[in-house]
Amino acid sequence: MPRGQGRLKKNCCRGLLPAACLLLSALIGPAPSVQGVRPTISNGDTTAARAHHLLAMADPVPGVTLHVEEASYKIGPFALEGVRARITLERTAAGVRVQVDDGLLERLLWDGVRSKGSFEIENISFQVRAAISKPSGMVTLEELVIRLPRVGALVIRGTAVPGKSLRLDLQGLELQLRHLLRGPLEPGRDWELLFPANLQATWVQGASGSWEISGHLRLEKASFHDSLFLHAGEGLGGSIRWRLEGGSGAILGGRVEARASAGEILWDRFYLNLSKHPVSMELRGDVDPAAGRWSVQSGALAVQGAAVIRLLHSSGALAPLGGRFHVSLADQEVGPLLDLFLRQPLEAEVPWLAAVRWAGRLGADLHLWIGAGLERALGIFRLQDGTVRIPEKGVNLTGLHLECPVWYERIAPSAADGSSPSGKRTGSGPGRVPPKDGPSPPVGRLSWQGAEFSGLKLGPATLRLEALPNGMRLPEAVRIPWDGQTVLLGPGGAQDVWTSNRQGQIRIHAVPLDLSPLLPPSLQGAVRPVVHLADQELRLQGERIVAARPFTVDLFSGTVNVERLEVRHVLSEAREGILDASWTDVDLEELTRATAFGRVTGKLKGRITNLRFAYGAPIAFDLVLQSQDDSPVERKISVTAIDNLAQVGTAQSPFVGMASLLKVFFKDFPYQKIGIRCRLENDYFTIRGLVHEGGREYLVRRGLVRGVNVINQNPRNRISWNDMVARLSRIGKSGKARVQ
């Protein structure tokens, strides 16, 4: 027998022990290195010598048995510890037969993901039936059975011709994959998983060293859930197919396809029926371990009937894992996508979504740089021929076109939390300079043919948009038709909007601008506010929006001077509005005509400071109302107004329930002065009179000849704001005041 062939047969005894692990390691590299510890053979050197003699002989001889007590191997990232087996060798006319019985691997370790822990399986049993033919030296693996505890059995069959070819076929039926989720893949202990699967795989290697691995994994009736069933899947079915190839150059390439087409998934509030909306994924690319690089030629993630996201040419590093990704969302109908991922998840919390109608085509093109998270994003989102109708909100948008530019830069933690005013970005980020290895900062536009908001109609307009780091800007002023008027909007912009240091501003010019269309229908016609915004600027500062300059509003034939307008916590449900304003020449007859308070004539001046408004109600203010002495307009106050004012201010009507009777004889009374100050602070409301005579405090001072005084008899009284609201709801029914 040739010397080389004898050495090959001799070493086959030891090499068959880690055969199963060699197959697994082929998924990582074409030529893993094997380091071993010589096994201890119980029968000592005599039995080993007999085995060597058996392999060297040309004629058939009876078999010899070796008992392996201890062995360990290192194959790439795999470590095999505590290998035990009983190996039987038999020389036949056709060659050598090898049989391994009672095989046990105490521990299989994988530390390939060192930063997240290790993967291990214990107490793996195996059996081997193999033959070595002469004179070709072909090895036939008739059957290698590997039994994984609680997982199931894997059966491997194949052939190998030294220096020419290798083929291994693997099959696993009714495997329980949940028991393989250990180490870095293991979910929390409060999760229940059931992943039954069938597996088929083939490994083929040629004489040149090129190899190919293909396979198919099929899941049937899989399920999972957490302890609260907030995340659950039931009756899940799908498959994964792969084809990987490599060669002596150590570059691995291939294609992976996956599809989930049965079952239901609930993830928090999101629900997906995979039978109606199958999810599929495909990926084609290669890995160069020597260079530490990866690249993807193409990829796609599709939710049937909703969306298709494509991954175009992308590349990056293996350690640490990251790189540049080019993601594309082909133009597709927006309706099914929003129905599945917006209407259905949120309809119970936002009932008006049920009546919303939307249409159009949605698309996107994004370049993403991913390292320790998302480092940078540049691209654009598109909406074409869009329409949105929200009947409950009175919103109707038609002919909507949006090309929304995106420029995201990851901010260093010290800047993101506001502790550093410099706004430093991460080391890999370019600050406010566009990246040299990617596209220029995108530009876009927003246009519409018609826009209606609760009766307010905007005419056609087009806005040009430019991306800023973590923001956007409107580079030029745009004329927007506003219900027969014109508003000049821009230039302006905002950036760093994802941090507490966000900054921005927008210019608005509208002189005059009738705000009546914004009022509730019950007030339209009775109230006509007209605002004068001459070169006004709204500024964004952190979570505040502030009007940069005072402005005026024409209201009830008078003038309101808005000295301060601010909105705080704009991104919170607890957003708060703040207002300081003063007014003169307000016509009381117009004002009271628009309310149920009762008729009052004359002119009114006053001011309100620190008006704070949140959750749809005031939480603080300081209000002063005074009649205007220099006005020639006749001053009169009706019985209804006196009765209501007394009730609000002093808790008892001056007419003691006789207001309706007095109306028969008196429509109104003359008055000399009105002076009232109301304050709301810490949920307590107080009302004081500003007219003082003879040690008394008057809310309303009667005329010189006749009239009615409304006296505040308890100036130190204060009530809760809820009680004040209750009084307002009982206007005309009760109070506590004195009439002279």
Image (spheres, rainbow, N blue to C red):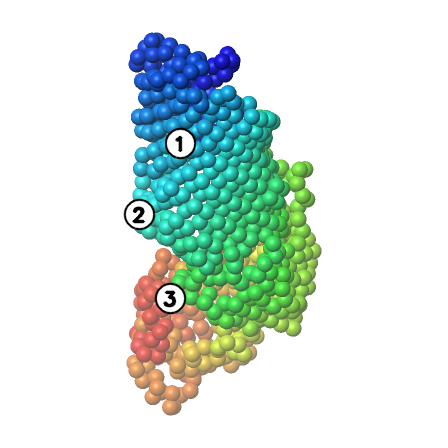
Q: Is residue 694 visible?
A: no
Residue at the location (42% across, 66% down)? Answer: 351
Q: In this orientation, which residue lies closer to the viewer: 120 or 217?
A: 217
Q: In screen coordinates, is 638 left or right of 252?
A: left
Q: Position of residue 434 (x, y in %)?
A: 66, 41
Q: Is residue 232 visible?
A: yes
Q: Measured along the vertical axis of the image, is residue 732 above or below residue 341? A: below
Q: CA distance from mark 2 to mark 3?
A: 56 Å
Query: Label 3: how many residues lie within 10 Å, few (<14), some (14-19) or many (20+)?
Result: many
Mark 2 or 1: the one toward you: 1
Residue at the location (41% across, 75% down)? Answer: 701
Q: In this orientation, which residue lies closer to the viewer: 721 or 674?
A: 721
Circle 1 residue: 143
Q: Position of residue 593 (x, y in %)?
A: 48, 80
Tell me the kind of residue under disc 2: Ser
Q: CA distance from mark 2 to mark 1?
A: 42 Å
Mark number displayed over residue 687:
3
User: Looking at the rendering, which quadrant does residue 344 occupy?
Assistant: bottom left
Q: Position of residue 74 (x, y in %)?
A: 43, 21
Mark 3 or 1: the one toward you: 1
Residue at the location (44% across, 43% down)? Answer: 217
Q: Are marks 3 and 1 in contact (CB under 8 Å)?
A: no
